[in-house]
């Protein structure tokens, strides 16, 4: 059977023959053109990066699909998420605070809440809250996606944590959900707020918000807040008072101007923002706004369970948690947390006992008016770990509610001076004439000597208006000579000194922390705890470990993440250790000798604030750092007051009660450990004896190696005119020396010499008139000879301090300044 013939006009296709165009330009199956006469253009394949760019059809399809999915999710969320009953947090639980050994320190969280209907809340108070939190509440929807996106963007851009929540959303969080920062909670909040906005009136939502919000002082709701801050019912609040309570919603703890006076400026600024918002919305006239004054809230009435030191410790721990954003105000207030602190119960009790025995037991407020002004604060840190092991906040939290260990309104005085010297060593600084700054560098210590090299004129007074002439930095530190350190801070650079202090642990936002020559005298207002942090960095050889008050936080078995506290070497070991070596001298030979009663090798610095409003002692052993401050404050007005006449003394200095409290506490705190010497690595030249001074008729030359010339006569302790040829402590020695000083013949200028078998910092010599003979044998740290008139002869087998020449005005005094003239 033959194959079927093809139809007429059909041409068999040869696969080896290319297609040819047919008639009329039409391409048929043979490849001919069609009726249009044009062949379709072939799509060019994408090459290079274009291969990875999706086409517009794909993009449009994805967008439509996303929109459908999002719409479906919104519908599903709205249908599936119901408005739940009030959460358990509407009745807050207690937080339990524990000592480091696990025993209970305190418990808080007794709920203070009284619900009131919206009709009992003055209209102006409602409007103040809206001006603070949500000015378009009555006209807006339950949620504001645009505000939420804007807040998220600002937070990501580093403009601070911001909220895009409406009042409806905040009410849902307070009453129906919780304070946890999770995605699931935010999603639930979103849908519940939408439903609530559709089912409830604006007044119902506002009433619920005002009755569930946390205002601080353990007050939940506007009625409890009115009582806690102003001792009145909410219906009697003024517009100004309502605006302050509205201010607290932004940051309840920080904006309490009674508990945190250092935050007053921020709180008042926020209060003004609220009032200005009321004017913009037409809820308050400009005339009424201008006449409104800030309403001072009343004193805190702490719970009885927080009496003694417990309240101070709990508030300090809360501040630590909130400041580092471990938890926020509302979350912490929700309760249920077990918070293990770093407070060592034994050392905490020792601190309280030391203050009671050394200071409180001596107060007689009934007979001495000045004793009513006395306050004390203290903080103790383990420098190796940064853990705060003890804190003294005041006489009793229920009587004096401001924590004296954490407040920021007293000058730190001369306890700042070690930071100046640390910065000098760290930066390799030199004097105006090119000499490297070491403990042996000579400065002029005359009273009201004008500072050289500063664009800001400054000529500070020394304590007691005493002039010292040319003295070493070591001696100037022992006696806290203002003139020397005022010049040194300029030589180093005020900016560099501030940077060093911040590195050591002083917060950059400390009040009055200005880079000016006066900063050397401690004009800034750091807290006792801040100063303990900075001295802990010195004690740990320049290694900064952020302090902590919290060991562990957990809730229902789940641990809360704590901030990282990795130690960091912020200044060189040589800079920190050389500073420590001079502070050892302050305790051994200077204004801090009362600290020797601790029975452990110690370094420290005294300080007395302007007008004697505060007296400080900051000291440390190799393994414990403690700062103690006495402060003057009027118990009725809260104003800072001088301590003149307190405890029956003309003046209160850092080397007195603060140093004695420090010694008593440290002795007990370290009673289980053997005394430990400091392990120091000093800067080059710091431990070497300087060369003798040049002859009087020879101009002083700057040594080529940058070392300072020999020191002049060192001011020493009073001797009553005896033992002029005796053994003395003329400087700090790295070892003990067995010395014998013999007075020889003096014809207006002959000098005596001492022999040291140990290593001494320096030998101080002066001129004598007449004939002096003496023989001393004992253990000495140098040799001192001062000026004397007449003829003396004496033998002393003990350790004494020789006299010296000290100018006070136009009078030469042959002894160290009296105690009331030193810090």
Image (cartoon, rainbow, N blue to C red):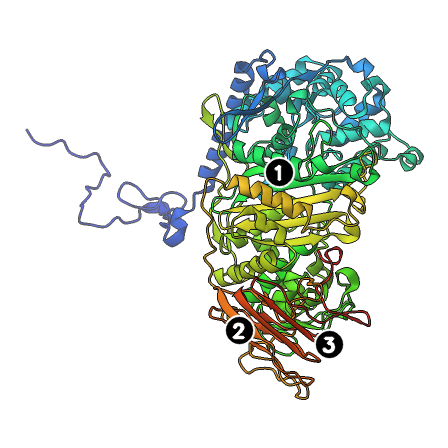
Q: CA distance from mark 2 to mark 1?
A: 39 Å
On residue 790, which mark appears?
A: 3
Q: Nearer the viewer, mark 3 or mark 1?
A: 3
Q: Earlier in the sequence, mark 2 or mark 3?
A: 2
**Helix, strand or loop under label 1:** helix
Q: Is residue 684 above or below residue 189?
A: below
Instruction: Tell me where residue 465 sits by quadrant.
Output: bottom right
Q: Please rate how many residues cluster around mark 1, counting C-alpha atoms within 10 Å: few if below 14, some from 14 to 19, many from 20.
A: many
* Mark 2 in CB contact with mark 1 (< 8 angstroms): no
- Residue 189 vs 344, above or below: the answer is above
Pick the quarter of the image with the N terminus.
top left
According to the picture, the residue beneath numbered tag 2 turns out to be: 689
Rounded to the nearest whole Å, what is the CA distance between mark 3 and mark 1? 47 Å
- Crowding around mark 3 (Cα neighbors within 10 Å: few <14, some 14 to 19, many 20+) is few
Quadrant of the image containing the C terminus = bottom right
Give the answer, above or below, for where 114 lies relative to 276.
above
122 left or right, relative to 379? right
Mark 2 and mark 3: Cα distance apart in space: 31 Å
The spot of residue 489 in percent (x, y) is 67, 65
Q: Is residue 372 visible?
A: yes
| Front residue of this view, candidates 50 and 542 | 542
One can see residue 343 in this view? no
Q: Nearer the viewer, mark 2 or mark 3?
A: 3
| Residue at the image point whose x is 59% and y is 26% from the top | 331
Q: Residue furthest bottom?
A: 697
The spot of residue 651 in percent (x, y) is: 77, 50
The residue labelled by disc 1 is 354
Determine which quarter of the picture holds residue 322. Answer: top right
Give the vertical position of 383 relative to 427 (above or below): above
Q: Position of residue 31 (x, y in %)?
A: 28, 45
The structure residue drawn at horizontal position 27% and vertical position 49%, both measured from the top left corner, is 20
């Amino acid at each position: 059977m033959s194959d079927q013939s093809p139809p007429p006009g059909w041409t068999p296709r040869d696969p080896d023959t290319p297609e040819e165009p047919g008639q009329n330009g039409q391409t048929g199956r043979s490849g001919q053109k069609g009726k249009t006469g044009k062949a379709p253009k072939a799509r060019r394949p994408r090459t290079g990066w274009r291969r990875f760019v999706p086409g517009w059809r794909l993009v449009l399809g994805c967008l439509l699909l996303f929109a459908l999915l999002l719409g479906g999710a919104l519908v599903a969320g709205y249908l599936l998420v119901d408005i739940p009953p009030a959460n358990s947090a509407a009745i807050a639980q207690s937080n339990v605070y524990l000592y480091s050994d696990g025993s209970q320190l305190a418990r808080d969280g007794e709920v203070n809440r009284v619900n009131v209907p919206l009709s009992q809340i003055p209209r102006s108070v409602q409007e103040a809250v809206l001006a603070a939190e949500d000015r378009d509440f009555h006209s807006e929807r339950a949620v504001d996606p645009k505000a939420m996106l804007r807040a998220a963007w600002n937070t990501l851009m580093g403009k601070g944590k911001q909220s895009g929540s409406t009042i409806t959303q905040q009410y849902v969080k307070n009453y129906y959900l919780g304070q946890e920062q999770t995605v699931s909670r935010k999603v639930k909040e979103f849908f519940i707020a939408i439903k609530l906005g559709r089912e409830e009136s604006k007044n119902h939502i506002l009433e619920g918000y005002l009755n569930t919000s946390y205002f601080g002082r353990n007050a939940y709701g506007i009625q409890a807040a009115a009582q806690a801050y102003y001792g009145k019912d909410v219906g009697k609040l003024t517009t100004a008072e309502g605006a302050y309570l509205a201010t607290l919603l932004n940051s309840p703890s920080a904006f309490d101007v009674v508990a945190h006076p250092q935050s007053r400026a921020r709180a008042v600024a926020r209060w003004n923002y609220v009032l200005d918002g009321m004017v913009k919305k037409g809820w308050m006239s400009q005339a009424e706004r201008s006449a409104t004054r800030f309403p001072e809230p009343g004193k805190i009435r702490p719970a009885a369970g927080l009496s003694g030191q417990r309240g101070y410790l709990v508030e300090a721990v809360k501040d630590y948690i909130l400041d580092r954003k471990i938890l926020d105000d509302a979350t912490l207030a929700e309760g249920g947390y077990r918070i293990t602190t770093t407070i060592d119960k034994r050392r905490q009790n020792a601190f309280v006992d030391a203050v009671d025995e050394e200071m409180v037991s001596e107060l007689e407020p009934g007979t001495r008016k000045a004793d009513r002004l006395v306050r004390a604060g203290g903080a103790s840190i383990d420098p190796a770990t940064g853990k705060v092991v003890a804190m003294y906040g005041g006489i009793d939290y229920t009587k004096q509610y401001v924590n004296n260990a954490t407040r920021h309104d007293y000058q730190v005085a001369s306890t700042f001076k070690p930071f100046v010297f640390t910065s000098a060593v760290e930066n390799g600084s030199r004097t105006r004439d090119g000499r490297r700054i070491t403990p042996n560098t000579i400065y002029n210590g005359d009273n009201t000597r004008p500072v050289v090299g500063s664009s800001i004129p400054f000529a500070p007074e020394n304590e007691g208006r005493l002039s010292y002439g040319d003295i070493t930095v070591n001696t100037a530190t022992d006696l806290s000579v203002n003139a020397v350190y005022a010049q040194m801070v300029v030589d180093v650079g005020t900016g560099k000194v501030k940077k060093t202090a911040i590195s050591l642990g002083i917060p950059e936002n400390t009040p009055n922390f200005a880079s000016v020559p006066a900063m050397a005298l401690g004009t800034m207002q750091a807290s006792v705890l801040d100063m303990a942090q900075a001295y802990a960095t010195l004690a740990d050889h320049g290694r900064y470990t952020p302090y902590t008050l919290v060991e562990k936080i957990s809730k229902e078995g789940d641990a809360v993440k704590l901030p990282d506290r990795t130690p960091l070497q912020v200044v060189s070991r040589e800079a920190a250790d050389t500073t420590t070596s001079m502070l050892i001298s302050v305790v051994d030979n200077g204004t801090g000798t009362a600290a020797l009663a601790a029975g452990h090798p110690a370094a420290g610095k005294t300080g007395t604030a302007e007008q004697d409003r505060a007296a400080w002692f900051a000291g440390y052993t190799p393994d414990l750092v403690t700062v103690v401050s006495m402060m003057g404050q009027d118990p009725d007005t809260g104003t800072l007051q001088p301590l003149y006449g307190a405890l029956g003394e003309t003046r209160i200095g850092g080397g007195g009660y603060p140093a004695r409290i420090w010694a008593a506490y440290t002795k007990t705190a370290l009673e289980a450990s053997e005394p430990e010497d400091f392990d120091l690595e000093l800067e080059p030249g710091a431990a070497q004896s300087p060369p003798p001074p040049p002859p009087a008729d020879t101009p002083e030359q700057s040594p080529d190696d940058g070392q300072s010339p020999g020191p002049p006569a060192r001011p020493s302790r009073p001797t009553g005119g005896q033992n002029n040829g005796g053994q003395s402590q003329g400087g700090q020695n790295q070892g003990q020396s067995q010395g014998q000083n013999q007075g020889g013949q003096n014809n207006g200028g002959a000098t005596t010499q001492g022999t040291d078998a140990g290593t001494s910092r320096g030998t101080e010599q002066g001129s004598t008139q007449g004939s002096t003979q003496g023989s001393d044998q004992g253990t000495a740290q140098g040799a001192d000879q001062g000026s004397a008139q007449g003829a003396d002869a004496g033998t002393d087998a003990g350790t004494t301090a020789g006299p010296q020449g000290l100018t006070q005005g136009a009078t030469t005094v042959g002894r160290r300044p009296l105690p009331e003239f030193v810090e």
